[in-house]
Image (cartoon, rainbow, N blue to C red):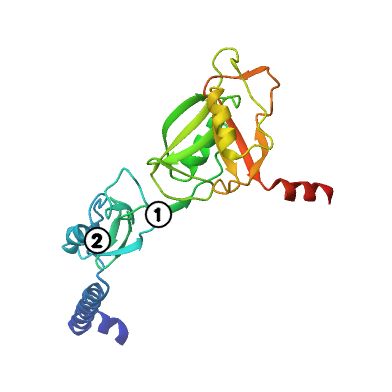
Amino acid sequence: MKLILFLKSNTFWLNAVLAVTFLSVLGLSANWILKGITGHGQVQVVPDLTGLSFEEAQERIASSGLVAEVLDSTVYFAKMDPGTVVDQYPMPGATAKAGRIIELTINRRRPGRVALPLLVERTLQRAELDLTSRGLRVGRITYVPDLAEGLVLSVSAGGVTLAEGSQVRKGTAVDLVVGKRTGPPTHAVPNLFGMRFGEAKAILQLSGLRVEWVDGDTSNTNLLVLRQFPDDSQGNFVTHKDGVVRVWIGDMSLEQNNDEQ
């Protein structure tokens, strides 16, 4: 009975109101303190930083309480300015709390180098695929009369002949010389076996053909032609004017000893 009377008394209700008020104030205070510590509630929309320099990106997000940090700077995109942002995380339009780090991928100032793949005697289609897969560009394609229809005969960049494994910067335009048959053959290939390189070159020039050195020391006048491609056609027309004949030169005696062994 006394409990019922106490619950109906002004003292009880006064104490109850004071207790609720105290707990509410305590809860709000704690919430404000947590917000001040964690930055909760200060949510910002992440801006698009693509195309900006790292310094410009820092300035753009500084007022939002966000922080820019370089995640990667090893990629290279030829269509974007060097030193600019090419990717970011979180993505543009996402929300982030103050103090959140925005990770940036920066375009390299100079493209990296890659090893040139094997292109000679590959089909043009295969050569183009191998070049683009390594970040290189197909430059000028020149067709010359040759039995190797559709095959790459030589590779160059900036006028410099390149070989497999040559280090080339990404984005470089690589020029290709490709063989092409035009009409019926008009020239025969002479037998060059056993000739010195200079002699073989002169014979081919007189025959309306071109020589391409493949292997051996051309400065050593004692070395002779050990192999040629195409082979001696024995007077039959097998190529066209300015067709390429490839030669390998070396010491004939060493070659014979190797064959005997």
Spot the residue most to the bottom.
2
**Residue 112 bears which disc, if any?**
1
Residue at point 21%, 81% (across, down): 22
**Residue contact at pointers 2 and 1, CB within 8 angstroms:** no
Badge 2 is on which residue? Answer: 43
Query: What is the x, y in percent for residue 103?
Result: 33, 61
Identify whether 212 is placed above or below 170.
above
Q: Quadrant of the N terminus?
A: bottom left
| Quadrant of res 68 | bottom left
Examine the image and state in which quarter residue 181 appears: top right
Count the labels in the image.
2
**From mark 2 to mark 1, how far is it between C-alphas?**
39 Å
Badge 2 marks a residue whose secondary structure is strand
Q: Is residue 202 among what the camera can see?
A: yes
Helix, strand or loop at label 1? It is loop
| Left or right side of 149 for 169 | left
- In the displayed structure, would residue 98 be above or below residue 20? above
Q: Amino acid at mark 1?
A: Gly
Q: Which label sits in the foreground, 2 or 1? A: 1
Within 10 Å of disc 1 (Cα), the crowding (few <14, some 14-19, many 20+) is some
- Asked if residue 122 shows in the view, the reply is no
